Image (spheres, rainbow, N blue to C red):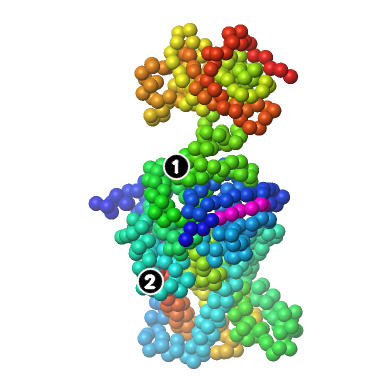
Amino acid sequence: MSTRIEIAGLSKALAGQVVLDGIDLAVPAGELTALLGPSGSGKTTLLRMIAGLDRPDRGAVLFDGEDALARPAGERGVGFVFQHYALFRHMTVARNISFGLAVRKVPRARIEEKVAALLRLVQLEFLGGRYPAQLSGGQRQRVALARALAIEPRVLLLDEPFGALDAVVRRDLRRWLRRLHREMHITTVFVTHDQEEAFELADRVVVMNGGRIRQSGTPMQLYREPADSFVYRFLGEANEVPCRIENGFVIADAGFPLGRASVRTGNGTAYLRPHQLMVRPEETGAWRITEVVASGHTSRIGLARGGLSLEASLATGQVLALGLEAEMAVEVEITGGMVVADTAAAPAPLLPGSRLARPHLADRPAEREG
Amino acid sequence: MSRPALWREPSVLPGFAPSLGATLLWLGLLVVAPLAVMVATAAGLGWSGFWTLALRPRVLGDLQVSVSTALAASAIDALFGFIIAWVLARYRFPGRRLVDALIDLPFALPTAVAGIALAALYAPHGPIGAVLAPFGITIAYTRAGIVVALMFVGLPFIIRTLEPVIAELETEQEEAATMLGASAATSFMQVLLPPLLPALLTGFALALARGLGEYGSVIFIAGNKPMVSEILPLLIVTELEQFDFPGAVAIATLMLSASFLLLMAVNLLQAWVRRQNGE
C-alpha cells in the first residue's frame, strides 16, 4: 500500500523571488525522508506542494507514476501534520480524529471503532473526550498525527513536527514516531531545520538551500561525503580556516600545517569539526586556551594560535582529567576535516599528518599568493 | 482559605474592595438610578393601571414593529458584517484603511443626519428609491425603511466584534480541513463558523440592543404610521410631548422588559454555543 513519490523540475516564484528552483526528487515507497534546510530554503513550500496546499509554476509530482497535481489536496490521499497542529479547538479529541472519516460518510460504528484504534495507537486511550486546550504539546502532536492517519493516507507529510516542543518531549516523540513508521511503513516526508532530528529519524535526508536540493542521501553518506561546504556546515558546527595547499600539504594562512589533502596547489578553506581537534597540555605547545565552557557532558574549548581562533569540543570528564583551563599552553592534533579549494567546488577530506609536514613549512609566517 | 488570597492578589490597580466599590457606584449612578426611577414611576401606576397603559393596541403594534425590524436588521447585518469583517481581517488591499475608517462612521455620525440622508436616498425620487420604484419596491416611509436605518447603525457592532476573532483564527485550520477531504461548505460550517459564533452572537446582541433603542435615524425614514411603521421609542416621545407621562413610562418599562428578555435569550444562546465548543 506504500506509495512512491517522484518530483521533477518543480519550480515556483513568488513576487519575483525564486522559492523553488527545479526540484528533482524521488522518495521510495515506505521510506522516511527528511527535508532539511535553513528557513527560507523552500523545504516547507516543497512539502505543501506535495500536499496540494501550494501550486508549482512548473514541474510534476507523481504518486506511483500518476499525476498528483491533477487532483485537489483533499483527494490526493495525503495525511498532513501542521507545525502548530491546527487541531479544531471546538471539537473533542475524538471528533478531531474522526473528522476526515465523517466527511467521507463512513458509517458511525466503523468511525467509533477506528477512532478507538487510533487513540490506542497514539497512546491517548482515555483522552478522547478532552478538548485540545486541555492537552499538553506532545499530546496535541499525537492527536494531529492520529487525525492525519485516520484517512489511511498513501503519504504522510509533517511540517516541523517537533518544532514547538521542549527537548525531552521532542526526543521521546521522535523515537515513538520512528517506531510507528517501522510498523506502518507509510511513505513519510517531514520538514525540519534540525540536523540531529533529520539524522536520527530519517532513512534519507534531503538538504535544501535557496530553493534547491544541495544533496540527498542516507545520513551516513551525507556525513561522510558532503557535496559542498554548505552541506558540511549545515550538518554540524565547523571551524573555518583560510588556508593554502602546497603539494598536498594544507597550511593555515596563520602559518602552520593542518594536514594533507589530495587537492591541487592553491588557496582554499579548511573545515574542522570541534570534535576533530584533540587537545593535550604541553608546556611548549604552540596553542593557547582562551576559554573553557562546560555545557553538560561536553565542553567547548576556545583555542588560539597566531591570530587564528578555533573551537574544540571535548568530553567534560576528559577536560577535568587533563586539567585544561584558560591561558594554558597546549598542543592540538587535527584528526580529520575537509578542505575546499577556491578553484574546485568538490571538497576533499583533510587527512591527519601535520607531523609529516616538511619542517621548513611549519611556523612559517602567513603569506598568501595573489 | 482561597478567597482572601484571591482578594489580595497583587496588582497595579487598587485592590478589590475599592475597585468593586467604584464599579457599583458608577453602574448605580449611570445605569440603575435612571432605570429605577422609571420602574418606580411605573409601579406608582398600580398593577392594573400599568397593564391598561402598556397593553394598548397601538403600543403592542409598535412594539411588534420595533422588535421585528431590529431583529431583521441585526440578522442582515450579521450576514454582511461577517463578510466585511472577513475581508478586513484576511486580505490586504489598497484602500483597506479607508474602508476600516468608514466602518466606524455610523458610531460617530449624529443619527438624525444619517436618517435624513437615508430618507433622501431611498425616497421614491431619491437616487436609490427611483431605481427600486419601477419594481414596486418602496423602502422609505415603510417598515423596510426602518430596517435600512437600523442596519446602518448596527453594522459596526458586528464588524468590530468579529474582526479580531477572525484575525486570530489560524488559516491552518481551514487547510487541515481541506487535507482531510472536507468541501469548502463543510470547512466553513464545521471548522470556521463554530469558533466565530460566540463573537457573531455578541455583535448581533449589540446591534439588536442598539436597534431596539434607536430613534434619531429611524424617524426620518419610517412612515411613522401607528402599528405599521412607527417604532416604540417614537410613541414614547409622542406621549411625552403630550405630557402623558404615565403612558410614556409604562411603554418604556414594557420596552425595557422586552429588550432585557431578548438580550438574555441571545446570551443564553451564546453560553450554549460556548459549551458546545468546549470552552
Q: Main secondary structure of the magenta part?
A: strand
Where is residue A26 shown, x and y percent of the image?
57, 51
Identify the residue under disc 1. A200
Relative to B132, say whether A168 is above or below: above
The structure residue drawn at horizontal position 51% and vertical position 60%, both measured from the top left corner, is: A78
Relative to A196, say whether B123 is above or below: below
The structure residue drawn at horizontal position 45% and vertical position 77%, both measured from the top left corner, is: B262
| Dots 1 and 2 on the same chain | yes
Where is residue B206 shown, x and y percent of the image?
51, 70
Q: CA distance from mark 1 to mark 2?
A: 36 Å
Q: Give the left or right position of residue B72, taking residue A59 as reference.
A: left
Q: Chain of mark 2?
A: A
Q: In the depicted view, which residue is nearer to us: A314 or B129?
A: A314
The structure residue drawn at horizontal position 43% and vertical position 73%, both measured from the top left corner, is: A106
Relative to A242, say whether B81 is above or below: below
**Can residue A370 be seen by looking at this rendering?**
yes
Q: How many marks?
A: 2
Residue that lies at the very extreme toward the left in this rendered image: B1
Q: Secondary structure at mark 1?
A: helix
- Magenta span has B130? no
Q: In the depicted view, which residue is nearer to us: B223 or B51?
A: B223
- Tag 2: amino acid: Arg
- Magenta span has A7? yes
Identify the residue under disc 2. A110
Query: Magenta part of the protein: which range?
Result: A5-11
